[in-house]
Image: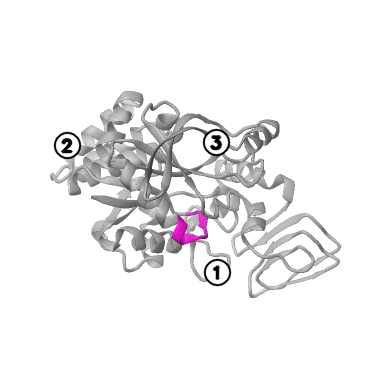
Amino acid sequence: MSVGLIMAGGFGKRLWPESRIDHPKQLLSFGSGESFLQAAYRRTCSIFGVKETYLVLREELKEKVLSHLPSVPPENIIVEPQGRDTAPCIGFASVWLGAKKGDVSMVVLPSDHFIRDEKKFTRVIRAAAQMAQKDYLVTIGIKPTRAETGYGYLELGKEMDQWGGVPVFEVERFTEKPSHKKAKEFFEQGNFLWNGGIFAWKSSVILQEMKKHLPKLYSGLVRIQKALGTSEEEKIIRDVYPSLPKISIDYGIMEKAKEVVAIQGDFFWDDIGNWQALERAFTKNGHGNIIRGLVEEEETSNCIFINREDKILGAIGVSDLIVINTENGTLVVRKEQAGKVRDLVDRLLADREKRKYV
């Protein structure tokens, strides 16, 4: 049996002030009529069915998520007491699913990615689910379209299997976000893929890898596993979860594990990691501007404007700017500095007086 697991508990600091702690990136839509989360849930349900599509999210987001997805069966929601990064999130979901459904093959999907070519996406996800049945750790790599320094990469080895016409490759290594020079080399070599953060494995297989590489995390998950279904379940989860190591699945497991294979995603994918990424996903007007909301521009080019509908934003004689105006805050940043929005948000979070704006 295979299930889809959507991780819906993230934040998306680089998309502040639209993305906030209580209204994070996955709930944004940018005027498309469908939030990232709604699109992810629709895609996943179309592959696995509603009954076999699960959400894992932090507790304080549950009400907001349900407002976007009111038809989700309550029994398909896995609630973390708090966010502890992707390794604890996936480990917790694995023991939870194991207790409910046995040793299932699970495809782990972020809730906040922008994906087109959904037929191709479906074909790749089905192939990943089948390869997971063979006890592999499967990662979906995305064929690069540019020398990107904002993503991690994986190096493909030889083709070692196939499912439904989809080739499966050995993974030589994972690499962290590279310099521009190194990213250019990866792009030109042709055997490097972006690490898309989409994975598949059996719950038992990923837990064994955690036992091997993240023993402290594993011992905490075992305590939770033993308490599931007992009167102590809620107490143990709340006691243990905050002590779990805060680490990503990439650093904690995938860069160290041996039985890792990759499938190349041939669909359009972008994680919309910062405001500048909107240029890759949305249409520009005749002046090269992306505009959402009530905006009037003159002699202005290559800008991104996101504004409210109740107040007008005017721009004259500017270029290469990102201006985001919301009820909670206003951001003005040059495009090449878009990646630094996260640093600004971290400073706001550290300031007791200002964190209310995040």
Mark 3–mark 2 distance (CA, rounded to whole Å)? 37 Å
Instruction: Tell me, yes or no, whether the highlighted magenta stretch contains residue 113.
Output: yes
Mark 1–mark 2 distance (CA, rounded to whole Å)? 44 Å
Relative image position of residue 47 (x, y in whole percent): 34, 59
Within 10 Å of disc 3 (Cα), the crowding (few <14, some 14-19, many 20+) is many
Mark 1–mark 3 distance (CA, rounded to whole Å)? 30 Å
For image coordinates 64% across by 44% down, the residue present is 344
> Splitting the image into 4 quarters, where does residue 103 fall?
top left
Relative image position of residue 313 (x, y in whole percent): 73, 69
Q: Circle 2 is placed at which residue position?
A: 226
Q: Circle 1 is placed at which residue position?
A: 32
Tell which tag, 1 or 2, sits nearer the viewer: 1
For image coordinates 29% across by 62% down, the residue present is 49
What amino acid is labelled 2 in the image?
Lys
Tell which tag, 1 or 3, sits nearer the viewer: 3
> Element type at marker 3?
strand
For image coordinates 17% across by 39% down, the residue present is 227
User: Which badge, 1 or 2, comes first in the chain's sequence?
Assistant: 1
Q: Circle 3 is placed at which residue position?
A: 153
Residue at the left extreme of this rendering: 230
For image coordinates 80% across by 61% down, the residue present is 301
> Element type at marker 1?
loop
